[in-house]
Image (cartoon, rainbow, N blue to C red):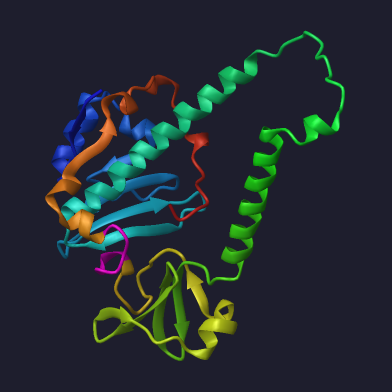
Amino acid sequence: MSSVQRPQTIEELLLFCQEKNMPLRTMRFFIGEDYPEPKAFGIFRDADGDFVVYKNKADGSRAIRYKGPDEARAVGEIYDKLHSEIMQRKQGSGIRRSQDYVSTEPRQRKPFTVRSLLSPSNIMLVLLIVIAVFICVRESNNPSRGYYRHGGSRYYYDSDEWYYYDDGAWVIADVLDWMEDDYDDYYVSNDYYDGFGANDFRLSPYYDGYYERSNDDYYDDDYDDDDWDYDFGDWDTGGTDWDTDW
């Protein structure tokens, strides 16, 4: 299996989709177009010169995934979404195929013994359950990743660290009392939106993935050619969750 160069411009993305025979309008992807109708993903360049990546939800409202001057960054967002939607359908069809066959042979129950209860596989299962519960409890006690607003200031929480928006840039914040006990009262959103009053945290050096996107190696595609093989004639837009922001 081989990989290809990631598209870095809208024109390159359109050419890539043509080569893969993607019926973009049927798939509800509008590349290079500010499409106004519900249930659509798209990318275009606005009158100010910024590149806008958007999703029009089922109710007609628009969620902005990215808005800024970095064309490669914007194209990467919609390119990754294309891949995600294709893989979701490929995996879903595989699940359906595996469920088509149901054995009619009666199962033979093994007799219960203490030895079977203490088998290595059962012990490993119990350990995995304990670890999963521990992780869930620990995560439930942490703030949700995303944007917060407190006292007119903007904050972001990610990976056990708080960040503060100060003078046009994100910086590491001191831990305040509300961050430890009352953070839920000040949570705004996991996704960035225009009007929040701060820059998109994903564009800061603290965001996981920033340096990869800034490096030339980022543009080496980590998807295989086989990932894009799909019978697009069977595309069903009902497979997309149109009520989420992305």
Taken as a whole, is the magenta stretch helix, strand or loop?
loop
Q: Nearer the viewer, residue 240 or 83?
A: 83
| Residue 208 belongs to magenta span | yes
* Residue 107, placed above or below residue 84: above
Q: Is residue 107 left or right of residue 72?
A: right
| Residue 54 belongs to magenta span | no
Residue at 25%, 60% in the rendered image: 210
- Residue 45, can we see it? no
Residue 154 x, y percent position in the rendering: 39, 82
Q: Quadrant of residue 23?
A: top left
- Residue 80, can we see it? yes
Residue at 39%, 45% in the rendered image: 40
Q: Quadrant of residue 111?
A: top right
Residue at 14%, 38% in the rendered image: 12
Q: Is residue 18 left or right of residue 63?
A: left
Residue 44 x, y percent position in the rendering: 23, 51
Q: Is residue 20 left or right of residue 62?
A: left
Q: Quadrant of residue 223?
A: top left
Q: Is residue 79 left or right of residue 230?
A: left
* Residue 71, placed above or below residue 143: above
- Number of marks in the rendered image: 0
